[in-house]
Amino acid sequence: MTAAPLRAALRHFFAWATTTGTWLVVWTAIYLFLLLWALIAGEGIGSPALYPLGLLAIFILHSIATLLIFLPATLLAELLCHKKQLPKLSGGIPLAFAFFLIEIALCGYVLSLTNSPEAPAAPEAILGLLLTLSIPMGFYWWVSQFPSLLRVTFLKIRQKFSKKARS
């Protein structure tokens, strides 16, 4: 295995771990806030199983969304940017979002095909997925691209300082 695929795999593992961890921390903060609110208001604190079940649900659902939607959209955008020599920011973001929209449309359509009476129609499923996954997709893209963007920025700064030192 060459260095480039390994670097990409590590970047995307880092992105998955970071974004999953962030959503777990957000759930913990929300749960603690609601627990404090219930104690102050003198209400019952609810089921103690809610917190670990919420953590498990976030972990599983975010992992599925990452594998089915975020990772493919980001990788396709990266490959196309690399092949066409497009810039990561001005080329990668619109491409990743376009692939994301295509995947959302496909997933929404598949969800609407289930034989369940509660299954939403395709437009509602697509809109629901779009509204709930757009921010996590953007967050995932930025986290996955952060190491390489940081490396490029560091190299540019180092190059400027080495030019000034030679002058």
Image (cartoon, rainbow, N blue to C red):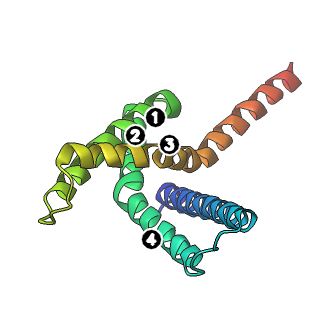
Residue 6 lies, with reference to residue 48, above or below; the image says above
Q: Which residue is mark 1?
A: 93
User: What's the amino acid at mark 1?
Assistant: Ile
Tag on residue 96? 2
Q: Quadrant of the C terminus?
A: top right
Characterize the local packing of mark 1: few (<14), some (14-19) or many (20 or more) Cα atoms within 10 angstroms: some
Task: Specify which label sits upstream in the sequence, 3 or 4.
Answer: 4
In the figure, is residue 37 to the left or right of 53?
Answer: right
In this rendering, position of residue 151 left or right of residue 157: left
- Residue 85: tell me if it is visible: no
| First-in-chain label (1 vs 4) | 4
Give me the C-alpha separation between circle 2 and circle 1.
Answer: 5 Å
- Residue 138: assigned label: 3
Q: Secondary structure at mark 2?
A: helix
Query: Residue type at mark 2?
Result: Ala
Residue 5: x, y in percent? 47, 58
Q: At numbered mark 4, what does the secondary structure look like: helix, strand or loop?
A: helix
**Is 57 or 40 nearer to us in this picture?**
40
Q: Which amino acid type is marked by label 4? A: Ile
SS for dot 1 = helix
**Disc 2 or 4, which lies upstream in sequence?**
4
Q: Which mark is residue 47?
A: none
In this view, 46 is above or below 126? below
Earlier along the polypeptide chain: callout 3 or callout 2? 2
Q: Which of 127/46 is in front? A: 46
The mark lying in front, picked from 1 and 4, is 4
Q: Nearer the viewer, mark 3 or mark 4?
A: 4
Q: Quadrant of residue 22?
A: bottom right
Can you tell which of label 2 and label 4 is closer to the viewer? 4
